[in-house]
Image (cartoon, rainbow, N blue to C red):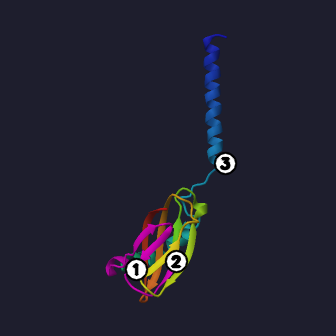
Amino acid sequence: MNWGLKIVIGLGAFMIFIVAAGVYMVSHDSDSLVDNDYYEKSLTYDEVYVSKENLEKDGAKPTIKVRNDTLYIHFVHADNQGELQFKRPSDGKLDVTLPFATKTNDFQLPVSTFTKGSWDLDVNWKSNSKTYLSSHPLFL
């Protein structure tokens, strides 16, 4: 076998590798950073904007801490009702939305069943007839 045949075999193997990698990437398309319902969310973005403005204007950003597999949220105002959206950046299938209601300023949630790692937490709640939205990075 001479060196010309080895070059042709090497180029052929490289081309097969590139084609196989392309087929794999197309068949396993799991882009979790893109929402499936992005159009519907864009129609209601005005509500999201108002909620974020209320958060800044009223200084109502909650304090979030994780200790001993428990999530602690301290709100500025009492009597809150809303939902917690846990988003996993690495795997959108693990995203969880949980409703909550408090009569006091504090809320506790056990998070021992959550997969360990990085999460994004969106707290969307209503208090004193105003809506608020706060986003926080978490590491559980």
Look at the picture and state if 39 lies above or below 106.
Answer: above
Q: Where residue 81 sits in the image (x, y, percent)?
A: 49, 84
Secondary structure at badge 1 equals loop
Q: Amino acid at mark 3?
A: Ser
Element carrying mark 3: helix
Q: Is residue 37 above or below residue 29?
A: below
- Per the image, the residue denoted by label 3 is 27
* Residue at left offset 53%, top offset 64%: 87
Q: Nearer the viewer, residue 39 or 91?
A: 91
Would you identify the image quadrant in which residue 40 lies?
A: bottom right
Q: Could you say where residue 39 lies in the image, as x and y percent from the top left?
A: 55, 68
Specify whether 19 is left or right of 139.
right
Provide the residue span drawn in magenta: 55-82
- The residue wearing badge 2 is 83
81 inside magenta stretch: yes
Local crowd size for mark 3, using a 10 Å CA cut-off: few (<14), some (14–19), many (≥20):
few
Residue closest to the eye, 104 or 13: 104
Q: Nearer the viewer, residue 37 or 80?
A: 80
Q: CA distance from mark 3 to mark 2?
A: 34 Å
Tag 1 or tag 3, which sits nearer the N-term?
3
User: Are circles 2 and 1 on residues that touch, CB within 8 Å?
Assistant: no
57 and 10: which is toward the camera: 57
Q: Residue at x 60, y 54 (%)?
A: 30
Q: Which mark is residue 9?
A: none
The mark nearer the N terminus, 2 or 1, is: 1
Locate residue 126, reporting x and y percent: 46, 84
Within 10 Å of disc 1 (Cα), the crowding (few <14, some 14-19, many 20+) is: some
Q: Label for residue 75?
A: 1
- Mark 2 to mark 1 CA distance (whole Å): 13 Å
Q: Which one is earlier in the sequence, the residue at label 3 or at label 2?
A: 3
